[in-house]
Amino acid sequence: MTRKQRDNPNERSGLLLVSKEAGITSHDAIDIFRRRAKFRRVGHTGTLDPMATGLLVLCLGKATRLQSYLMATEKIYEGEIRFGWATDSYDATGTKVGDESDARLTADTIRATTTKFTGEIDQVPPSYSAKKVDGVRSYELARKGEAQPLEPRRVTVHEFAILGVEWPRAHFRIRCSPGTYVRSLAHDLGQSLGVPAHLESLVRTATGNFVVGDAMPTTAMREAEPDAIFAEPHFRSMNRIELPMPLVTIDSSQERKLNNGQNLIVKPEVELVQGAQVAAHGIEGELIAICTVQRVIRPDGGPVELQPKVVLS
């Protein structure tokens, strides 16, 4: 880290792993960081509902240019589904709707039904969501009693595991694509089982290869000094960022070419296909650029031509 970076926190670029407490919005969590670190250039890789807790990955400085790549990574959640009644928001913050049920379900029955919600599925977002209907947020219409049906969207649920059942609650783990509404999964699972249900609690435990165990809690950040915030393991400088894509190491002359927008010919350590995304790192490990494989010069692990898409150096 240069002297300028040490003296001015606003020169620090990287990722900050934050563990959001319940009852605040994701933007509240970002504001806590901004106030404590006196930092302005901040982005995020996916928000959490106020009732949810867990991992937020903040992009700082130059790393804000990585937002779209990090937002595309899969998410892992754990939480509890409460059977017995449904709510209008599909979670515990909503108003109870419909009839209650005192029917009991076994763990095996619930597990057998979760298979309907794994793989690629078409999911209808909750009415209480930020999706727009004719330019208006869906939740704004729902609050006025004017909820409109939303179009289903294709999402991927890689895993929907029931970890345990203490009736009327089921503890679950879900690994899914970005944009998946876990609230909808809880609601739809109840409908499929014939027993109304809603999401009672939710924790995001991972985003890509980042885990909540490495994150700084917002409760601690409220009183933290900047030096404590910009410390590992919750802060990852540019030479500590590992993206979910193949890596190539380049030298200083190749870095200059990328800075000038020129393509590179490199021989990767793993076989790459045309169109693949690649993270180009410098010899000291710093992330230099995100590139796309423009051309495979020779297959079976031979050299490829890389085209820079995002240059960070």
Image (cartoon, helix red, strand yellow):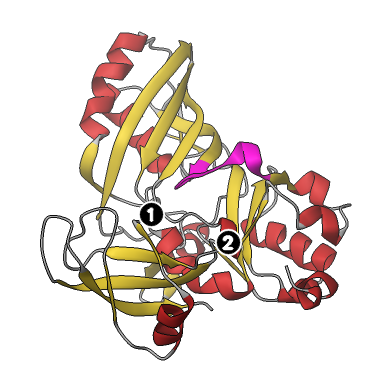
Q: Earlier in the sequence, mark 1 or mark 2?
A: 1
Vertical placement of residue 306 versus 127, above or below? below
Q: Residues within 10 Å of mark 2 (few under 14, many from 20)?
A: some
Residue that badge 1 annotates = 179
**What's the residue type where badge 2 is placed?**
Asn
Residue drawn at (13%, 71%) of the image: 297
Residue 69 position by quadrant:
bottom left
* Residue at the (76%, 58%) spot, across then down: 230
Q: Secondary structure at mark 1?
A: loop
The picture places residue 173, in percent across and down from the top left corner, at: 43, 29
Compared across the picture, whether 126 is left or right of 211 comes to left
> What residue is shown at x 51% (from left), y 60% (from top)?
45
Q: Position of residue 289 (x, y in %)?
A: 44, 73
The numbered mark at residue 239 is 2
Going by the image, does 2 lie left or right of 43? Answer: right
Which quadrant would residue 71 be assigned to in this image? bottom left
Q: Are marks 1 and 2 in contact (CB under 8 Å)?
A: no
Residue 79 appears anywhere in the view: yes
- Asked whether residue 131 appears in the rendered view, the answer is no
Per the rendered image, the range of residues in magenta is 206-215
Image label count: 2
**150 relative to 126, above or below:** below
- 181 and 196: which is toward the camera: 181
Q: CA distance from mark 1 to mark 2?
A: 29 Å
Disc nearest the viewer among 1 and 2:
2
Identify the image quadrant of residue 260. Answer: bottom left
Q: Residue at x 39, y 20 (%)?
A: 162
| Mark 1 residue crowding within 10 angstroms, few (<14) / some (14–19) / many (20+) | some
- Asked if residue 271 lies in the magenta stretch, the reply is no
